[in-house]
Image: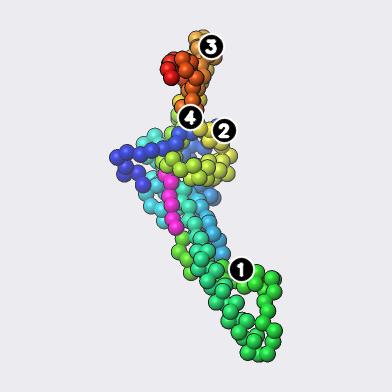
Amino acid sequence: MLNLRTQSFCRYRIQGELPSPWGEDFHRLLTERRFLPLMADQERTYGWVTSDNLLVTDFHAGTVMRGEWAAFGLRVDTRRVNARLLRAQIDLEVQARLKGMQDAGDKPRIGRDERKELREDLRKELMRQTSPSVDVFTVLVHPKQRVLHVLTLAQRANDLVRTHFADTFESDLLPLTPWSRSLEILDSEARAGNDLRAGLQDLRRTDFGRAVPAESETTSRDGTRVEVQS
């Protein structure tokens, strides 16, 4: 999962205490939240795996550390029953039961509860026969910089990584955007006696999604003023 020439990623600042990735506590917490295979009636399961092999959940310094970085992955297995196939199975079973009642001289009728139970039984049977889809999202952690990279831009995957990371380490992940990083730099400068925050007070976001009145002027966060003529 790490042999990549180029990669898109989302970057986060780690908030809260985090055990050293070289220590046993870090590996123990990963193991406690490791990936476990889907049960027969489960639709989704997820957990940590090593960065080298999605089938391995043996965490120690040799499988986690890559120089100054800790590398592991979040594996997500999802199993969904095809809705059209389920409806077709239900129709066949309903017709078979109605015919059986009619042949026995009974009134051919299936109540709501019976139909609901039939649907659930068939759903579980199809679930057992359905192979799950498998996704793995690589996570890189730099403990000294307190930075975490998720090697995907998919919002749902990033949300899942953030949730599972918080559950594992009791540490939050805050998006490290250019704007938030600039504020960090300014705070660092302020602690050094250089107050530069006032330079950001007049900056406004440039909105490219709606029309701007003729001969108006907007200001982007990088301080660039842009005149727009009609």
Q: Residue at x 57, y 33 (%)?
A: 16
* Spatial CA span between label 4 and label 3: 28 Å
Q: Which quadrant of the figure contains the C terminus?
A: top left
Circle 1/circle 2 CB separation < 8 Å: no
Q: Which is more toward the observer, 191 or 119? A: 119
* Spatial CA span between label 4 and label 1: 46 Å
- Residue identified by numbered label 1: 120
**Which residue type carries mark 4?**
Gly
Is any part of residue 56 visible from this angle? Answer: no
Mark 1 and mark 2 lie on one chain; the one further toward the N terminus is: 2
Image: magenta residue range: 133-140
Q: Residues within 10 Å of mark 1 (few under 14, many from 20)?
A: some
| Direction front: furthest residue | 230
- Residue identified by numbered label 2: 16
Question: In the drawing, what numbered circle is on residue 209?
Answer: 4
Mark 2 and mark 3 lie on one chain; the one further toward the N terminus is: 2
Question: In the drawing, what numbered circle is on residue 198?
Answer: 3
Mark 1 and mark 3 lie on one chain; the one further toward the N terminus is: 1
**Which residue type carries mark 2?**
Gly
**Element at badge 1?**
helix
Q: Which is more toward the observer, 36 or 77? A: 77
